[in-house]
Image: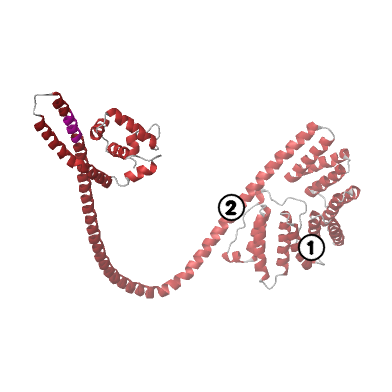
Amino acid sequence: MVQAVVGQEHVAPRSELQFPDFESKEEKTSHSYYLQLGDYLYKAGVYNEAILNYQKALQYSLAQVNKNTTTTLLRFKIGEAHLALRNYNFALNSLNQTLKSVEGTEDEVNVRILIGTCHEKLGQLPLALKEQMAALELAKTYNNKLATAKALESIGSVYEDMNLFKEAKNYFNMALISMPKNNLALEANILNNLADAYRKSGAIQEALPFTIKALQLAKRVNDKHQIESAHKDLAIAYKELGNYKLAYQHLNASDSLNAKIFYAQNTEQINALQSLHEANKKEAEISSLKQENKLVRAKQAVFLVLLIAIVLLAVGFVFYWNKKRRQNAKLVQYKQRMLKAELDKKIAEEENMQKEIKLKAMALSRYSLHLSQKNKILATVSTKLSHISERKNINASAKLKELVSEIDFNLKQEEEWNQFQIYFNDIHPGFTSELIKKAASKLSASELRLAMLVRLNLSSKEIATILRVTPDSIRVARYRLRKKLPIAPEQDLIHHLLQY
C-alpha cells in the first residue's frame, strides 16, 4: 500500500506531470479528487500545497465508514511530504500514526524506514539505528529485496553520521548485494554513499571508482540529481588529491546541472501552481453557478411579492419626493433671498467704505497741499517783511496789517494738521503704533510726521515744503529715521513703511 522513496528527489520529470482530469463533478467532493491532486503537486515539488490537499482528502476519508486503508495511505503521504520539506517533527507525528495502522503488515517496513530517516535528520542516531534495524528484519521476513536494500543503505547512512565508516561501508556493500537487479537509480545512490564513506575515512583514491561508476549509472537512467551529486563528490575528491583541473571541471559540471535542475523545478512548481489556480478558479465558478441555481427558484418565489412591494414603495417614494422637493425648493428660494439680502448689504457697506476711504484720501491730499501752500505763504511773508524793512518811503503800517491778517488766517489752519493725523489713522489704522513698536529707539513727533508723509509717497521736495525745511534736511531726517527702524540694507524706506 505505501511505498517510501528515501534519499531521492521527488520532483517528477516534466513529461510525467499531468494535471488530474476528473470526469464527473461529484468526484471533486471526494477524497479521491484531493488525493490525486496532492499526488500531482507532490510530484511537482509543491509540497506545502500537496499537504493541504492530502489533509482535505483525509477529512473526507475520516467521514467514510470504510476509512482505514485510505486514511493510512494519506497519513503516510502527509508524513512523506513533511519529510521532503524537512519538517521532521511533523513528519514523525504523521508516520507514527501510520505505523499504528500498518503494524504486522509488509507496509510497516517502509514506514519504519522513513521514521528512522526522520530521527537521523534530527540527530537522534540511536533511535534512527533502532528503527532501521527493525525495518531490515521485517524486510527480510517478507523477502522484500527492495526494502532490504533501502534499510541496509539507511543503516549505513546512520553509521556514517556516527563516523563509524567501517560499519557504514559494510552495510552499503550489503545493500549493493541485496538490491534487485537493474534498479540503476538505487544502485547509483548506494555507490555515491559508499564513496562518501571511503572519502570521509580518508581513502580518497579508493572512493573514486565508486563515484565514477555512480556517475555512469546515473547518466544511463538520466537521474540528474545523482549526476549532479556524483560531479560534486568527484570535485571534492580531485581537489583533495591535488588535481585542481579535474576538480574545477566536475565542480563546473555540478554547478551547471544544479542550476538547470533548480530552473526545471521552479518551472514545474510554477506550472503546477498555475494549474491548481485554474482548477480552483473553475471549481469556484462551478460552485458559484450551483449557488446561483439554488437562488433562482427562491427569487422567483418572492418575485411577485417584491414587485408589488417595490411598486408601493415607488409610489410612496414619488409622493414623498415631490413633497420634499417642493419643501426644498421653498427652502432654497428663502436661502437665496437671505443670501441676496446679505450680499446686497455687504456690497452697500463695501461701497460706503470705499467712498469713505476715497473721501479721506482726498482730504489727506488736500491737507497735504494746504500745508505746502501755508508754508509757501509764510515764506512769502518773510520775504515781504525783509523788503519792507529795507524801504524807507513806504507806508509800513498798512503793509504790516495786511501781513498780520494773512498770517492770522493761516494760523487758524494749524488745527488741520491734527485733522490730517485723524484721517491718516483712519486710512492706515495701526501704522503709528506698529511703527513705534518696531523702532529701535523712541521716535520724535517730527519723525512720526515724516514717516506718515513718506507713507503717502510724497517726494522729499514736497515734504520739505510741508515741514518748512530744506530738502537736505529731509534727507538727513530720512536717514535718521531709517537707522531707528529694522530695515534691510537693500530695502527702500518707502517699501518698508508700506508694510505697516
Residue in the image at 35% along x and 40% along y:
443
Q: Mark 1: which amino acid?
A: Asp
Q: Nearer the viewer, mark 1 or mark 2?
A: 2
Quadrant of image for the C terminus: top left
Is 72 inside the magenta-drawn segment? no
What x and y, as percent, mark residue 319?
28, 71
Is 377 inside the magenta-drawn segment? yes
The mark nearer the N terminus, 1 or 2, is 1
Q: Quadrant of residue 383?
A: top left
Left or right of residue 397: residue 319? right
Image position of 328 with respect to 445: above or below: below
Q: Is residue 1 visible?
A: no
Q: Which residue is mark 1?
A: 107
Q: Quadrant of residue 449?
A: top left
Q: How many marks?
A: 2
CB within 8 Å, label 1 to label 2: no
Q: Mark 2: which amino acid?
A: Gln
Residue 274 disc label: 2
What x and y, as percent, mark residue 259?
68, 41
What x and y, as percent, mark residue 130?
86, 59
Residue in the image at 17% along x and 38% along y:
410
Q: Which residues are magenta?
A: 374-382
Left or right of residue 305: residue 41? right
